[in-house]
Image: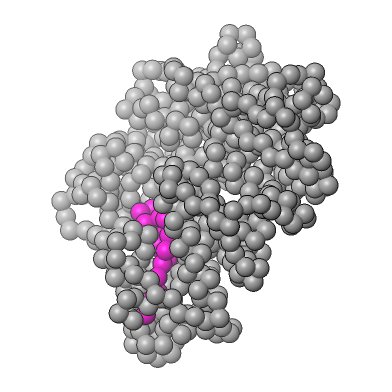
Amino acid sequence: EEVCDTRRSRSRSRSRSPPPSQRVEDGEVDTLNLEEEDVALILGKSGRTRLKIERVSGAELWMRQNELVLEIRGDERARRRGKRFARCISATRAGSIVLSDEDATDECTIVQVPQDAVGFVTGKGGAFLRGIEEDWCVIMFFAKYAGQGEASNEKDEEKLMIFGSRRDRRGAQLKVMRAVETKIAGFYTDRTRESGELFDDDAHDEDWGTSVSQLKEEDIAYAYGAKGSTKTKISNAAGCIVQYVGTTVYMTGSKSARSRAKEYLTWLFMQIDGPVFVDCSGRLDASVLDVPKDCVGYITGNRRETLGRIEEEFQTLMFFMAKRGDDGDGGSGGDSAGPKTGCERLAIFGAEERRRRAAELKVMCSVEFKIPGHYTSGLPKERTSDRPEFDTEHLPVLPEEISYGLGKEGATRRKLAGASNAILEYIGGFAFIAGTLTERRRCREYLRWLLEQRGGNGVTVDSRGREDLEEVRLSQGAAGWLTAGGAHSGVPELRRIEQETSTFCFVASDPEGEERLCVFGRDDGGDGGGRSKAARLVSDLLQERSREAGGGSGGGGAKNGHEHKDW
């Protein structure tokens, strides 16, 4: 057995530094000496284990070239976590892992798992645990605990250690509890029913706690949904961790999030008997949209498939409501006059206004397609807003511009929305843009530049003062290759890079007339993605083309202080 030692060791020897664009601001470095067999364990298949350690710890891991030394970079807390995880993963090679009080910090949750369920929870080749780690951004392993807090190591139970943020640990813990309960019914839920045990050591204030509800056995399948889709919908919309363990529903989060989850679950079962009316007046988690009766079936879809897709995409709960008083309830749905003549009211619930508005605009787009002018007739030609907070604007677009701005299966629209972090929908002859003031302005600019490129027209972009741009220098002929059509052009690869990095890339001239590739996006790539990643991938693409053509450099250096030729 190897004890996970978390003592720090300051690097004293020369090491390979990470590229400037990925170097952590904190210059401190810890090192860990490895055996040759440890390297493969810490790297994992295709580097997945290393990425997992980095994601959960917040540290960066670098292997020194030609040395069995692991460098761990980041702030003190991140380095401590990164080193602990690396040591524990290395310890699996020697057998059991033993953790001390120092390891079982407030960033660790310990779950007691009966030995009869350990194999079931682990899964074939550890697949089940690895799946939970991916879903919840945690690191998990069975270990012996030598600390004082829970000194005993029951021979009929194993301790599963879960490391990560509070929310992620709780989500992973409840997933494990659900799995154990399917194998050994009542192992956890009996204690919850008998003594009120919630298995939540972090519950201590209104910002975090756990509530429970009991379901009937025959209701579980309905509440869970196909592959957990209904449970996930309620959890996402409420902003609350929701998990069914046996017939007990555990809801963890803030007091308001738990309250929303309870209500959403109640409405779910009320709908079995027919449409439900909800008084939405004064609610901060509700939006209401009048939908023509002729479009209700179109919006709902066969077996609720269309509405379900919208709910899943925007993490909302949506249903058509009964008319006021039809279910014996009173109140008003936010409009005492009720729905417009010939319409039914679609209620959209969710903790985030942004997601509710995105779902609302998606429905409006579909209705407008079926009944042109239903929402847009009478609209002013254009609406702008100087409100810094979340708001919605619209501007007119021509039919041929909408087709170009949508792209194949909506790919271009999604690209502009992703790069700007705004919501973009084409409704009738208008482009609706929702987001903060910065997001709305960027989306407007991106859309204008996109439409200026129709017909092969050139675009001029001034980069001065922009915080959403990275520029890639281009050698002679590279601009034409990146923009020309045809099977052998660089356009397909550029579109793939945009999709992978949520960026908007195009060749544009600067005020002096020099062409370069502009990479726009909201993310500066601090986590290895976004603009920095896109610029690196484009640089690699251009250099590869240059080598294939037998030429020299294909360009690809970035102007904004980032060089991409050594990646």
Reply above or below: 275 against 456.
above
Instruction: Give the position of the C terminus as an image quadrant.
Output: bottom left
Quarter assignment of residue 268: top right
User: Compared to 150, does 466 lie above or below?
Assistant: below
Quadrant of res 403: bottom right
Image: magenta residue range? 515-534
Q: Which is nearer the eye, 310 or 347?
A: 347
- Can residue 445 be seen here? yes
Measured as percent of width and height from the top left, residue 128 is found at 59, 41
Q: Is residue 285 left or right of residue 475?
A: right
On screen, residue 398 above or below 324: below
Q: Residue at x 55, y 38 (%)?
A: 353
The residue under the point 59% across, 43% down is: 357
Q: Is residue 120 left or right of residue 61?
A: right
Q: Is residue 540 magenta?
A: no
Is residue 521 rendered to the left or right of residue 74?
Answer: right
Between 75 and 154, which is closer to the camera in this rendering?
Answer: 75
Whole-percent x, y for residue 216 in the image: 76, 20
Q: Residue furthest top?
A: 195
Picture coordinates of residue 293 (x, y %)?
82, 43
What residue lies at 33% left-to-right and 50% top-to-bottom? 60
Q: Judge from the rendering whether residue 497 lies leftward or rightward of residue 429; answer left or right.
A: left
Residue 525 counted in the magenta span: yes
Relative vertical location of residue 294 with respect to residue 106 in this rendering, above or below: below
From where the camera sits, is residue 183 visible? no
